Amino acid sequence: MAHGASHTFGRGLPGCLREGSFRLLLTGQAISIIGDAISMIALPFAILAMGGSVGQVGLVLAARAVPNAIFLLIGGVWADRLPRRLVMLTSDLIRGVIMVAVFIVLVSDVGSIWVLVVLMAIYGIGEAFFRPALSGIIPQTVSAERLQEAYGLLATTPALGIAVGGAIGGALVALISPAGAIAFDAVSFGASALCLAFMKTKGEPSPWRNRNFRKDLNEGWTAFSSRHWLVVVVIGEVLYALFVMPSIYAVGPAIADEKLNGASSWAAVVSGFGIGFLIGGLTAMKLRPQRPLILAYILCIPFAFFFIAMAIAPPVIVLALAAIIAGSVISISGTLLETTITREVPQELRSRVGSFRTLGSVAMLPVGMLLVGPITGTFSNTGAEILAFVAVLMNAAIVLGTPSVRALRAKYPNEDDAEANDNPLDAIPPVESTV
């Protein structure tokens, strides 16, 4: 009786949640994203409270991105060599320690902007190893038939993270201090590491001994550069790094501080993005477009108009509604893109290809952050938001105008095979990775 009830309950869940390793990965990522959302609200306001400028906010964020770009390809190679779970676990622990150090600096009031720059640089190194490993490990935790469903569900974790984390972050900054909010982020890394410690994966990389680093790197470059549609996608993402992300993370808080109600208003906007991510992620789980990249980039067009709303700075409720729409379409677009890349790239190359794919945007992000000061000084905060609007439209135009993008067709495996293998604990019994 009890066993039957458990099985019935499991059948009511999305298929990917019946696979235990994916459940742990999803839980860890959700907790970690909550912490990230809290710190992304707290850190800019901490810098502003120290007497820093918008340009210095961009400098600290750039300090995180520069070593991320430098070490990203190295991280990609090692994530295809070592158990990806081990790489992610180590990265989580390192970044958790760094956030503890940031908390100490802020609460003791003995540090400076430059101390935060150094700490964020070390944080960026740890992140450079985590991101390629994450891009490669997802198919190791879920069956191929449920891959898009898994990506769609993962796309909802920013919803929980940003909605919950945004609300908590705004409240902590307003009621306690930015330092108190940073402490929550440090704890979230510990919780994520705990989930990874209990997670199991299948299809681990071959032993790394006697493998040539340069050869491995060249294989990754060949796999990336031969997929012209992916190269074009990355070119478009460079525009996001230069103009879109800085307009959200650096200029957005400044607009909220000047024209709205400070941290609480910005938290409402960030939470709106989270709600949108939830809507979009749940929607994307069931979509089966024949040309997924075409749909993905058409959906970028409504996202562009969020920046027009930011430039106008309407009442907070209007801006939050615009964020919900923007989050929804970006969540669907991102799910379709990530699923396509995963299906088109062999498992043993995914982390290296993922690192080359990410390198363009990561390398340009510090440049974009450093340009925030000159751009806002020349064109104002409003002008920076208009530039972001233009960049999103240019990205969509470049990708949609590429023949190899339009020619790419989706391949959807038969989900019946996965259903036949379901059991109450796991769809596919994984092989525990060695540490």
Image (spheres, rainbow, N blue to C red):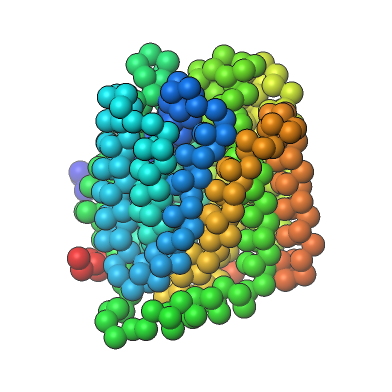
Measured along the vertical axis of the image, is residue 289 above or below residue 411?
A: above
- Say whether residue 4 is left or right of residue 358: left
Relative to the observer, which residue lies in front, 115 or 421?
Answer: 115
Query: Residue 214, how many percent across, how many down?
Result: 43, 81
- Say whether residue 386 is left or right of residue 432: right
Query: Residue 149, how many percent across, how many down?
Result: 49, 54
Quadrant that contains the N terminus: top left
Can residue 342 be seen in the rendering of this structure? Answer: no
Kindly identify the residue that appears in the image at 79 percent across and 62 percent down: 401
Kindly identify the residue that appears in the image at 28 percent across and 49 percent down: 94
Relative to the observer, which residue lies in front, 422 or 341?
Answer: 341
Measured along the vertical axis of the image, is residue 108 above or below residue 215?
A: above
Quadrant that contains the C terminus: bottom left
Measured along the vertical axis of the image, is residue 106 above or below residue 129?
A: above
Relative to the observer, which residue lies in front, 404 or 375?
Answer: 375
Kindly identify the residue that appears in the image at 74 percent across and 33 percent down: 378
- Say whether residue 302 is left or right of residue 227: right
